[in-house]
Structures are given as structure tokens and as C-alpha cells.
Image: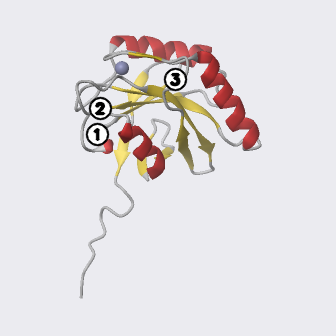
Amino acid sequence: MIRYVLPTDTELRITDSVAVDLFHYRQSASNVLESGGILLGSCYPDYLLIDSISIPGFGDKQGRSFFHRSKTRAQTLINHAFYKSDGRRIYIGEWHTHEEVTPTPSYTDRMELRLAFKRSKLHFDFLIAIIVGNSDRIEDSWVGYQDSNDLVECHRLPNVFEHITLVND
Ligand SMILES: [Zn+2]
């Protein structure tokens, strides 16, 4: 579980399986194209969980430094996830990859996220953006929070077990 804190002080959790999926699409070599998709998850009383993503597929357009996802396929996936989970699994935001170790949103990313925020039927007054760099650590990804004002970076919280020292006896 990778954890972040949103500007609203809500905790954001990303499951290990989503982290593995995102890491799989990192642009680890110069011939790996940019990837992207949507983030799906659920809202709990104490935290927001991202537990599923869409991966590149039919209708998406990929290049070395661009990714245009198919709106139709994304909407179908969102609807399917919503009905299959009795309305619990919802659209939470967007992810894509960058060919850099420490990714930050480009000008285009900022424009597109602002548009996504305006045009999407959201369950909250924000959306989450994840940019996966080509680092060997998925924790080096950039995680942001887009609301009607701005796109801001979310700070990562320590992993739950990071501070526990195991003692072998
Ligand atoms: Zn980007």
C-alpha cells in the first residue's frame, strides 16, 4: 500500500496491485511508448482508495511523449466498474507515464487535467493525477490533486511498516 495525504488532509491509498500495474508501464527503455489510463477506486470514511486502473488498449494513441486515451472505452470501463460494484467503484482520476526519473506535470498535463476536472462527472470536487516516471521505485511517481483552483502535489506518507525494525533472535 502506498499512501499519500491530500490537501484536504484525507489519506489516499494506492493498492500494491495498482502500484505493480503502474510500474509495469513505466518507460524503462527508449523504445517504450507513453502509457496512460484512468484511476478507479472507492471512498471510505477515513481514506480514498485507488484499487484499479485502466491500461492502454483499443482506441488509445501512444507515442514517445504523448498518450491520448479513448474517451469511449474509458467511459465504458467506468460504467462497468460502477454497476459491477453496486456504485462503490468510481472514477478517481488519470494516470500516465513520463520518460524521466522524477516526473512533474507538463504545461499540457496541467491544461488537460483542468479540462478533465471540468468535463468529468465527478463524485468529489477534485480528481487525482498520477505520473509514473522511469525510476526503479514506484514511490518516485508524482501524485497530484486537481480541484477548481489548482493542481497541487500530494505528499507521500511513510509505508505502514517502514518504521518497524525487525529483530532476529
Ligand atoms: Zn505528462
Q: Is residue 119 above or below residue 155?
A: above
First in sequence: mark 2 vs mark 3:
2
Q: Secondary structure at mark 1?
A: helix
Q: Position of residue 93 (x, y in %)?
A: 53, 29
Which numbered mark, 1 or 3, is in the foreground of this view?
Answer: 1
Residue at image location 40% in from the left, 16% down from the top: 109
Q: How many marks?
A: 3
Residue at image location 27% in from the left, 75% down from the top: 166
> Given the image, on which type of amino acid does mark 3 rest?
Asp
Q: Is residue 120 left or right of residue 111?
A: right
Residue at image location 45% in from the left, 35% down from the top: 7
| Mark 1 lies on residue | 140
> Given the image, on which type of amino acid does mark 1 rest?
Asp
In three-dimensional space, the C-alpha distance between marks 2 and 1, rounded to whole angstroms, equals 7 Å
| Mark 2 lies on residue | 133
| Numbered tag placed on residue 55 in the rendering | none
- The answer to whether residue 118 shows anywhere in this view is yes
- The answer to whether residue 4 shows anywhere in this view is no
Which numbered mark, 2 or 1, is in the foreground of this view?
Answer: 2
